[in-house]
Image (cartoon, helix red, strand yellow):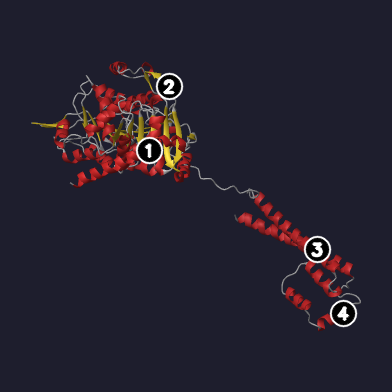
C-alpha cells in the first residue's frame, strides 16, 4: 500500500507538470493571437480598459469573483478577451471550446494516472464483480457417498452384497426380498464393516464412525439398519440393551418394531416396544426383571418414542444403557426440530455411567470419549455408534452440532454439491396443483373421488379439527368409503384403520401430518394436500407417501389463489420445477353442488351434537 501511494503521488506530480506546460504554451499562443504586449495589455485599447475599471459593471463584479479562484490558462484567456473586446459571440464560443478542451485533457490525464497505478498494483479497474457468498460445508457434507436415486434401475441382488449372514439371507428370501435397493446395498456393508470385530469393540479397536443417511421416502432406509444390527447381535451371550431406536411417533415406532420382530424371529434376540400404548408397569416388565443378584435386562433391542424413553431412564430401576452399542435416530431432522435434544442428551449420559444399578463389575468399562492417548487405548471399551436416518436431513451446522457426531459418513441420493430438497422426492412421482377458492375445496375433493374415480387416496390437512370436519362432511355426502387418521383416535382404532386402508377397504383416508413421517402406507395411489403445507419439508414428507419403492404416484395440492405465489416460490427455492397446473372448470363441479349443500346442513347438526356431548 505504501509503494502504491508513493507511486500515485509521483504520477500525479508528473500529470500536473504536463498540465502546467500545456497551460503556458496555450497562454503564449493566446497572447500572440490577441495582439497582447509582453506586459499583458492590449495594444490600442488601454482607454477602453480604463473605462471598464472606472465603471464597475456586472461583468466587472463577475471578474472579481472569479479572481478569487485559481484559473486555468483558458479561463484567463477568455476573461482577457472579454475585457479587451467586450462580449463578442465568436470570441465567447472560442473561449468555451478552449475551456472544455482543457477540462477534458485534465480528466484524461487523471484517468491515465490512476490506470497506471492500478495496473502496476495488479488491480482490475474496468469491472468490479459483486462478491458471491459460497456455502462452506464440512468435508463429510461436501463429499458424501453418492447413492443412485432410481430404484428400479439399480437393484442389487442380495447375494452380491458382501458380509450378510446366510441365516438373514434366508429370512430375506422368505419375505420375498431378492434384491436390495441402492441405499440398502451401500449402507448395510458400511455398518457391518464398522462392527467387523464384534459389538464389543470397533474395527481395529478404534471408535467407529457415525453414519448419516439422507435418501427419498420409500427408498428402504428401515431395512438398512435392521439387517446389520440383527446380524451384529446374533452372537450375543448375555442379554443387554445393545441397540436403541428412537422415533418421533408411535405409529412409526410400531412399524419399525414389526420389522425387527420379523428378522429376529428364531434368533433368541428380544425386541421391546415402549411408546406409551401399554401401561408403564407392563413396559417395565418387558424391559427388566429383578432377581436375587439384581436386575437383568429382558431386551436386546429397544424401539421407543422420546417421551416414554425418558420416563424409563429416570424411573425404571435396573434399566441400563451402559452396554448400548447402536443408537439409531430415525426421522432425525424432526427429532431436532421438535426439541427432543434433551432426550438425546439423557441417552448419551445414561450410556456412559460406568456401572449399572446391580453393582456387578463389567469387564468392558465405558467412559465418555475424549482425546485418544496411550492410556485411553489400553483399556477396551464398548463404542457407541450413532446412525441417523431421514428423508430431509438438515445441513444446518448449529443443529448438527447438537448431535455430537464422531467423524460422520454421509450417504445421500443427491448428486449436487448443495443439496436441493427436490432430490429427495421419489422418481415416479407426478406433481400437480389446483388453484381454487376456499368454498370449492370440498367440492374438488368430491370431484376427484366420484367423477375422476380416484382410489386409495391419502388426504392431508393441517389440524385435527380440520381433518375431523372434512371426514364428517364426506361421510355426510355419501358414496365414498372414508376414514380419518389423527392423534385424537386411540391407538387400536388407528391400527385398524391403517390395516383396512392397506387392504383397499377404505377409498379415502383423511389425515394430519401424523402419517407424513416415515410410515410405510402401502398402495397409496394419490396424495391430496387439502391444506397447503407451510414448510417445504412437510410437503416432501406428505407427497412421499406415494410413489414408494420405485412405483408411480400422483400428488395434488389444493390452495387458494392468494397462496399460489408463495407456494410456487417455496417449491422453486427447493429446486422443484416439474409441478404442473391442473385447473378444474366450475362447470365440472355443478352436478355436486345440490347434494353438497345438503351435506353441509348435516355437518352443522353433527358438530352441534358433538359439542353438546362434550359439555355433558
| Mark-to-mark CA distance, 3 and 2 | 81 Å
Mark 3 or mark 4: whose residue is earlier in sequence: 4
Q: Quick one: label 4, few (<14), some, or many (20+) residues within 10 Å?
A: some
Disc 2 crowd rating (10 Å Cα; few below 14, some 14-19, many 20+) is few
Identify the residue shown where x is 29% and y is 43%: 604
Tell me residue 468's x, y (percent).
Answer: 29, 39
Please tell me whether mark 1 or mark 2 is closer to you in this view: 1
**Mark 1: which secondary structure?**
helix
Secondary structure under the numbered disc 2 in the rendered image: loop
Q: Which one is earlier in the sequence, the residue at label 3 or at label 1?
A: 3
Which quadrant would residue 87 be assigned to in this image?
A: bottom right
Q: Which one is closest to the eye, mark 3 or mark 1?
A: 1
Q: Which mark is residue 89?
A: none
| Marking on residue 594 | 1
**Which of the two residues, 265 or 372, is positioned nearer the viewer here?**
265
Find residue 370 and report its horizontal and vertical position in percent: 30, 39
Q: Which residue is mark 2?
A: 152
Q: CA distance from mark 2 to mark 4?
A: 105 Å
Q: Residues within 10 Å of mark 3 (few under 14, many from 20)?
A: some
Nearer to the camera, 252 or 556? 556
Q: Nearer the viewer, mark 4 or mark 1?
A: 1
Q: What residue is disc 4 on?
A: 48
Q: Please tell me which of labels 1 and 2 falls first in the chain.
A: 2
Is the residue under label 2 in contact with that under label 3 (CB below 8 Å)?
A: no
Q: At 26% across and 22% down in the image, what residue appears?
A: 262
* Residue at far left of view: 292
For mark 3, what is the residue? 98
Chain-order first, disc 2 or disc 4: 4
Amino acid at each position: 500500500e505504501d509503494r502504491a501511494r508513493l507511486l500515485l503521488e509521483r504520477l500525479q506530480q508528473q500529470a500536473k507538470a504536463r498540465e502546467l506546460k500545456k497551460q503556458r504554451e496555450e497562454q503564449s499562443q493566446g497572447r500572440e493571437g490577441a495582439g497582447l504586449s509582453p506586459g499583458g495589455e492590449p495594444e490600442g485599447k488601454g482607454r477602453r480598459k480604463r473605462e471598464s475599471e472606472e465603471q464597475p459593471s456586472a461583468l466587472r463584479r463577475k471578474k472579481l469573483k472569479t479572481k478569487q479562484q485559481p484559473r486555468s490558462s483558458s479561463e484567463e484567456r477568455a476573461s482577457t478577451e472579454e475585457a479587451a473586446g467586450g462580449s463578442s459571440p465568436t470570441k465567447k464560443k472560442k473561449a468555451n471550446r478552449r475551456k472544455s478542451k482543457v477540462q477534458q485533457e485534465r480528466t484524461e490525464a487523471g484517468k491515465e494516472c490512476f490506470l497506471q497505478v492500478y495496473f502496476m498494483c495488479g488491480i482490475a479497474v474496468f469491472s468490479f464483480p459483486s462478491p458471491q457468498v459460497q456455502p462452506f460445508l464440512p468435508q463429510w457434507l461436501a463429499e458424501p457417498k453418492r447413492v443412485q436415486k432410481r430404484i428400479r434401475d439399480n437393484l442389487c441382488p442380495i447375494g452380491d452384497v458382501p458380509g450378510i449372514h446366510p441365516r438373514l439371507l434366508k429370512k430375506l428370501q422368505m419375505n420375498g426380498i431378492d434384491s436390495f435397493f441402492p441405499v440398502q446395498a451401500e449402507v448395510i456393508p458400511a455398518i457391518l464393516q464398522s462392527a467387523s470385530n464384534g459389538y464389543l469393540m470397533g474395527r481395529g479397536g478404534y471408535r467407529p464412525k457415525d453414519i448419516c443417511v439422507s435418501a427419498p421416502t420409500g427408498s428402504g432406509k428401515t431395512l438398512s439398519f435392521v439387517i446389520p444390527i440383527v446380524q451384529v447381535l446374533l452372537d450375543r451371550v448375555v442379554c443387554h440393551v445393545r441397540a436403541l431406536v428412537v422415533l418421533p411417533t408411535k405409529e412409526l415406532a410400531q412399524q419399525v418394531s414389526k420389522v425387527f420382530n420379523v428378522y429376529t424371529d428364531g434368533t433368541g434376540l428380544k425386541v421391546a416396544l415402549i411408546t406409551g400404548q401399554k401401561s408403564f408397569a407392563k413396559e417395565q416388565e418387558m424391559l427388566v426383571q429383578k432377581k436375587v443378584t439384581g436386575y437383568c435386562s429382558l431386551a436386546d433391542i429397544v424401539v421407543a418414542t422420546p417421551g416414554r424413553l425418558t420416563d424409563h431412564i429416570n424411573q425404571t430401576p435396573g434399566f441400563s444403557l451402559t452396554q448400548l452399542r447402536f443408537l439409531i435416530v430415525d426421522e432425525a431432522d424432526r427429532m431436532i426440530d421438535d426439541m427432543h435434544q434433551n432426550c438425546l442428551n439423557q441417552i448419551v449420559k445414561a450410556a456412559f455411567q460406568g456401572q449399572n444399578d446391580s453393582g456387578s463389575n463389567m469387564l468392558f468399562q465405558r467412559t465418555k470419549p475424549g482425546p485418544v492417548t496411550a492410556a485411553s487405548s489400553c483399556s477396551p471399551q464398548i463404542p457407541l455408534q450413532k446412525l441417523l436416518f431421514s428423508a430431509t436431513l438438515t445441513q444446518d451446522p448449529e443443529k448438527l452440532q447438537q448431535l455430537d457426531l464422531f467423524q460422520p459418513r454421509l450417504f445421500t441420493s443427491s448428486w449436487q454439491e448443495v443439496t436441493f430438497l427436490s432430490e429427495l422426492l421419489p422418481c415416479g412421482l407426478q406433481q400437480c396443483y389446483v388453484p381454487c377458492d376456499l368454498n370449492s375445496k370440498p367440492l374438488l375433493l368430491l370431484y376427484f373421488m366420484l367423477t375422476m374415480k380416484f382410489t386409495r387416496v391419502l388426504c392431508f390437512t393441517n389440524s385435527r379439527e380440520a381433518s375431523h370436519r372434512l371426514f364428517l362432511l364426506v361421510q355426510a355426502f355419501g358414496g365414498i368409503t372414508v376414514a380419518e387418521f389423527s392423534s385424537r383416535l386411540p391407538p387400536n382404532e388407528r391400527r385398524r384403520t391403517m390395516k383396512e386402508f392397506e387392504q383397499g377397504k377404505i377409498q379415502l383416508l383423511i389425515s394430519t401430518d401424523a402419517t407424513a413421517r416415515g410410515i410405510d402406507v402401502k398402495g397409496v395411489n394419490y396424495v391430496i394436500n387439502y391444506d397447503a403445507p407451510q414448510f417445504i419439508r412437510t410437503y416432501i414428507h406428505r407427497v412421499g407417501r406415494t410413489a414408494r419403492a420405485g412405483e408411480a404416484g400422483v400428488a395434488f395440492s389444493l390452495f387458494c389463489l392468494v397462496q399460489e405465489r408463495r407456494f410456487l416460490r417455496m417449491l422453486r427455492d427447493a429446486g422443484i420445477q416439474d409441478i404442473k397446473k391442473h385447473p378444474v372448470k366450475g362447470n365440472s363441479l355443478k352436478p355436486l353442488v345440490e347434494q353438497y349443500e345438503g351435506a353441509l346442513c348435516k355437518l352443522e347438526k353433527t358438530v352441534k351434537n358433538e359439542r353438546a356431548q362434550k359439555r355433558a
